[in-house]
Structure formats: structure tokens, C-alpha cells
Image: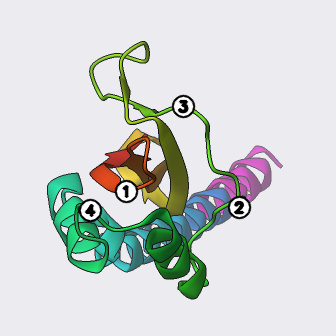
Amino acid sequence: MVKAIVCFLTMIACIILVLCLIISGIFLWVYTYAYLLDISNPLRRPVEEIREELLELTPIGSSIEHVIQVVDSNETWEWNGRISSTGYPTDASLNVRVGESSIRVRFGKLWIPHRGFLESYVGAYWGFDEDSNLIDIRAYRQ
């Protein structure tokens, strides 16, 4: 009788071990697949490169209407249609503002797998002078 119980418990332990290995393998596969998909995301580029690309689309001196046209033409960008009556915050300080007015756009979000799949948003601010001409762009990742 004891031998049968030991055999049964050994079989249960083996089944649990196999199930744990299967579940771990599935998790590892999903994690790796998600990471590989996300690593090829163009939003992973350095924010300096994103800013340079935006400056090609909307050079310094562009009118606010031109910037809005570029933003509206990209359906994947998220913009609430609001033009802020203040400039955008600098990277170093929320109290220091660039421009007299600004637009904030989110381009999308990234996963950060090594931090437990936290989300990081990528976007940009366009800052305008008192004549509504572009004076600078700040790309960000938060």
C-alpha cells in the first residue's frame, strides 16, 4: 500500500513538473516574441533622431497651420486638437517653458520588457512664438 502511494505521489509530482515546464516555456516564448516585435519598433530610436525627423517635416519657422496639417495627416499620432496657450516644459524643468503656445502629440507607446512590461509613451512638443511660428521641437519618452 505504501509503495502504491509513493508511486502515485511520484507520478503527480512528475505531472506537476511537466506542467510547470510547459507553462514556463509558453511564458518565455510569449515574452521573447513580444520583445522581438517591440525592439523593431521605430519609436525605440533615440529621441534626438525622432526630433530630427520631425524637423524635416516641420522646419523651424513653420506656421502653426502647417504643423497641424502634418499632425492631422498622420492617423497613428494621438492629438486632442488642443493648442496650449503656454509653451512646452523643458526636459530639465517643468517651470521653464519654451514658446508662447505649444502642441503635444503622442506617437505611441513602447513596452519595456526588462522592467516588467511597463509602458513608455513617445511623443513630441512643438513650441511656437507670439506670431504662431515654430521655434523648437522637443521629442520625449516618458
Residue type at mark 2?
Answer: Gly
Residue 52: within the magenta? no
Residue annotated with mark 1: 133
N-term mark: 3 or 1? 3
At mark 4, the secondary structure is: loop
Percent of width and height locating residue 24: 51, 62
Q: CA distance from mark 4 to mark 1?
A: 5 Å
The span shown in magenta is 1-14
N-term mark: 3 or 2? 2
Look at the magenta stretch and give its main secondary structure: helix
83 left or right of 102 in image: right
**Residue at image point 53% right, 84% down:** 74
At mark 2, the secondary structure is: loop
Q: Looking at the picture, does residue 18 appear above or below residue 74?
A: above
Q: Are marks 4 and 2 in contact (CB under 8 Å)?
A: no
25 left or right of 77 in image: left
Residue annotated with mark 4: 61
Residue annotated with mark 3: 86
Percent of width and height locating residue 100: 46, 35
Percent of width and height locating residue 121: 49, 51
Image quarter in which the C terminus is found: top left
Residue type at mark 3?
Answer: Thr
Q: Nearer the viewer, mark 4 or mark 3?
A: 4
Q: Are marks 4 and 1 in contact (CB under 8 Å)?
A: yes
Q: CA distance from mark 3 to mark 1?
A: 14 Å
